[in-house]
Amino acid sequence: MDSKQIDILLVNKEASIKEAMQAIDRGSLGIAFIVDRNKKLFGVVTDGDVRRAVFSGVNIKKPIKVITNKKPIVIEGRISQKEMLSLKKGKDIIGRCR
């Protein structure tokens, strides 16, 4: 994934849930990386997180930070798809498979 592809997925933590939904849609990966004003990772939000929030009555005009997973599993480097799938069971993961 190159920097242009990653930039599409970056959403400021003060942006609305609706704006995050648009980033998730543009990125086509089902995830947005939520960042602070210095582009430091604040957390992640998946399309499932948004869906659950909307079903529970959260207004999509609220800031995305209210539904962000602030403790995702972060993988540095490359791992196999098998390793990622074993880690993924029930968790949000940021990483690349080879």
Image: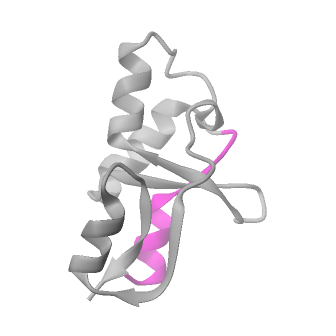
> Which contiguous range is marked in magenta?
1-14
Against 54, is 9 above or below?
A: below
Residue at the top extreme, as displayed:
57
Q: How many labels does the image show?
A: 0
The residue closer to the viewer here, 14 or 85, is 85
Residue in the picture at 63% in, 48% down? 70
The residue closer to the viewer here, 65 or 23, is 65
**Residue 9 shown left or right of residue 47 in the figure:** right
**Rendering quarter of residue 97:** bottom left
Residue in the picture at 63% in, 30% down? 66
Residue at the left extreme, as displayed:
82
Residue 96, position as x, y percentages in the image: 36, 79
Against 76, is 68 above or below?
A: above
Q: State the colouring used for the structure image.
A: one colour
Residue 44, position as x, y percentages in the image: 52, 52
Against 62, is 7 above or below?
A: below
Against 80, is 23 above or below?
A: above
* Quadrant location, the C terminus: bottom left
Specify whether residue 91 is painted magenta. Answer: no
Residue 74, position as x, y percentages in the image: 53, 70
Residue in the picture at 42% in, 54% down? 92
Residue 78, position as x, y percentages in the image: 39, 89
* Quadrant location, the N terminus: bottom left
**Residue 50 shown left or right of residue 74 in the figure:** left
Specify whether residue 11 is painted magenta. Answer: yes
Residue in the picture at 64% in, 37% down? 65
Residue at the right extreme, as displayed:
38
